[in-house]
Image (cartoon, helix red, strand yellow):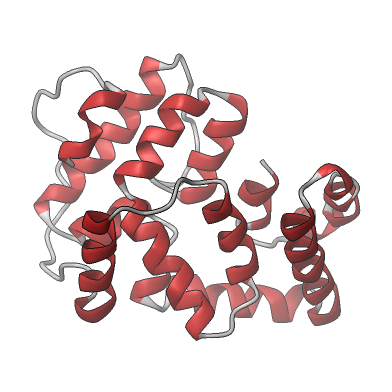
Amino acid sequence: MLASLLLDYPDADWFARLDELHSYFADLPTDVRSALEEFVELAREAGEITWQRRYVATFDLKRKCSLYLSYYATGDTRRRGVALVTFLEAYRAAGWEFDSDDLPDYLPAVLEFSALGDPEIAGALIASHREGVEVLRAALEDLDSPWALVVRTVTLTLPPIDDRTRERFLDLVNEGPPTETVGLSFLGHLPPFSPSTQESL
């Protein structure tokens, strides 16, 4: 849940909650706690306006730093609509009401779902898009971005990547997400979400 909140847009309310969020760090593993403490300190030093500008410059203007998980594998192509519906089906399968203005594959939303909804289904969603998480982490680290500290704590909670995921990750690092530009279509009949089917995505 902490990573979900820290990766969200840093508006005035975000900054107002930093002290509260920091109070939860004490019970975290040492490596996770150290990374998040460093991140919070950097945010405080930068201040609200500068931090917001850095956030937009990072996540809104760089293709390899998207917080939308399905973007890495599908880009803005017709397949993206199907991927987004899969996230919605997953939330519904767990009885989770997704009422955000963001798209359902927004990483902070998936992390919130993991903390407050169904961690098993959330884990399946993240595993299905693990290469995207790794591209995001690597891109942020290459930029020496403070948000790399938070994304790295997310990857620390995940199983080691297998050879297939590593190959897809390297392909995306080299080539970037698909670039076909089309309208997102949500038409079509999809089967109910099942974690066991997610490897096919």
Count of number-bearing discs: 0
Quarter residue 83 falls in: top left
Rendered location of residue 181, percent (x, y): 13, 66
Q: In the image, 51: left or right of 67? A: right
Q: Quadrant of the C terminus?
A: top left
Q: Quadrant of the N terminus?
A: top right
Tell me which residue sits at (48%, 68%) in the image: 137
Task: Give above or below for 136 relative to 20.
Answer: below
Tell me which residue sits at (65%, 75%) in the image: 146
Quarter residue 112 falls in: top right
The residue closer to the viewer here, 18 or 198, is 198
Rendered location of residue 197, percent (x, y): 20, 28
The residue closer to the viewer here, 79 or 143, is 143
Tell me which residue sits at (24%, 70%) in the image: 172
The residue closer to the viewer here, 185 or 128, is 128
Tell me which residue sits at (54%, 41%) in the image: 111
Rendered location of residue 153, percent (x, y): 62, 56
- Could you tell me if residue 75 is visible in this image? yes
Q: In the image, 87: left or right of 61? A: left
- Could you tell me if residue 104 is visible in this image? no
